[in-house]
Image (spheres, rainbow, N blue to C red):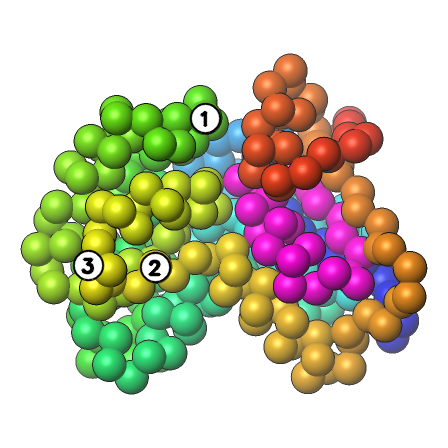
């Protein structure tokens, strides 16, 4: 297999660009094709069958782009459609944010209680708690849905008094459980890291699902002999199903750099 083939990353919208950003920093030689299903976001209110159908469609599209690895940067898709994605991917390796976040959460043998925050759909799926318990049956997991974080991040209120007050309210019951680490179970949440660190204090470790996914991808590519050794700069492509006016602005905030050209796909 050609190791210079791109990595395919996909999400229901724009949040997965935090994973792309982490991949760019951790794997600067890797080409990336990002797919955001912006016409059909949000996924969280849709049925499992619909999410599985959309996930299979996107997987097939990215396989058609000759990718060497798939990264599911959408917690909702990872929680409810992981088996469908892997079945469609066949021999192509698949990594998802839930697996990466769960592994990182239990990596410290003295992890104590583990807090998980995410959207209501992700938290209600129990996917993080289930995977953490599979990796460490003795782990104590305390989950908390934080529905207001996504709109606050997309509004750009990353250090706004309203966001700080909201975080304090959401995290109060979790911090009362004497946790040692807090898993950011949504790809929007890494943009809130400075504020969340202030709220939780120095005694709690933040597990960023974007950077942990990039780390797991790097380890997997190395182990499979698929790490790119290209000399020149890699190509980055961004494909979406709709280009709302705000996508470019929000996307560049998430990515920390210019998006350049964004391609629109009509199914």
Residue 83 seen in the figure = no
Q: Which residues are magenta?
A: 15-36
Looking at the image, residue 249 lies above or below residue 143: above
Task: Reply above or below: 144 against 12.
Answer: below
Cα separation, mark 3 vs mark 1, equals 28 Å
Q: Which residue is depicted at the point 37% across and 52% down?
A: 184
Query: Which residue: 24% across, 38% down?
Result: 167
Picture quarter containing residue 250? top right
Mark 2: secondary structure: strand
Between discs 2 and 3, the one toward the N terminus: 3
Q: What residue would you read off at disc 3?
A: 142
Along the line of sight, which residue is nearer the eye, 5 or 55? Answer: 5
* Residue 44 in sight in this render: yes
Question: How many angstroms separate mark 2 from mark 3 (CA)?
Answer: 14 Å
The C terminus: image quadrant: top right
The x, y position of residue 259, in whole percent, is 73, 34
In space, the residues marked 1 and 2 are separated at their CA atoms by 21 Å
State yes or no: discs 1 and 2 in contact (Cβ < 8 Å): no
| Location of mark 2 (residue) | 206
The residue drawn where x is 77% and y is 74% is: 227
């Amino acid at each position: 297999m050609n190791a210079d083939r791109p990595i395919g990353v996909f999400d229901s919208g724009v949040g997965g660009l935090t994973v792309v950003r982490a991949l760019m920093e951790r794997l600067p030689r890797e080409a990336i094709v990002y797919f955001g299903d912006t016409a059909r976001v949000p996924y969280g209110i849709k049925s499992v069958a619909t999410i599985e159908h959309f996930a299979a469609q996107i997987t097939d599209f990215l396989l058609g782009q000759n990718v060497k690895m798939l990264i599911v940067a959408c917690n909702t898709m990872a929680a409810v459609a992981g088996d469908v994605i892997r079945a469609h991917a066949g021999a192509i390796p698949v990594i998802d944010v839930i697996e990466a976040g769960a592994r990182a959460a239990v990596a410290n043998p003295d992890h104590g209680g583990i807090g998980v925050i995410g959207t209501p759909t992700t938290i209600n799926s129990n996917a993080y708690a289930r995977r953490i318990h599979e990796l460490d049956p003795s782990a104590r997991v305390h989950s908390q849905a934080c529905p207001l974080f996504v709109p606050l991040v997309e509004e750009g209120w990353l250090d706004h008094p309203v966001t700080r007050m909201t975080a304090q309210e959401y995290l109060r019951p979790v911090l009362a459980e004497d946790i040692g680490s807090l898993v950011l179970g949504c790809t929007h949440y890494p943009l809130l890291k400075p504020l969340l660190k202030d709220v939780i204090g120095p005694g709690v470790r933040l597990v960023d699902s974007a950077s942990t996914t990039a780390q797991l991808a790097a380890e997997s590519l190395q182990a499979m002999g698929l790490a790119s050794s290209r000399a020149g700069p890699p190509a980055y492509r961004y494909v979406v199903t709709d280009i709302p006016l705000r996508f470019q602005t929000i996307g560049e905030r998430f990515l920390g750099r210019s998006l350049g050209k964004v391609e629109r796909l009509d199914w």
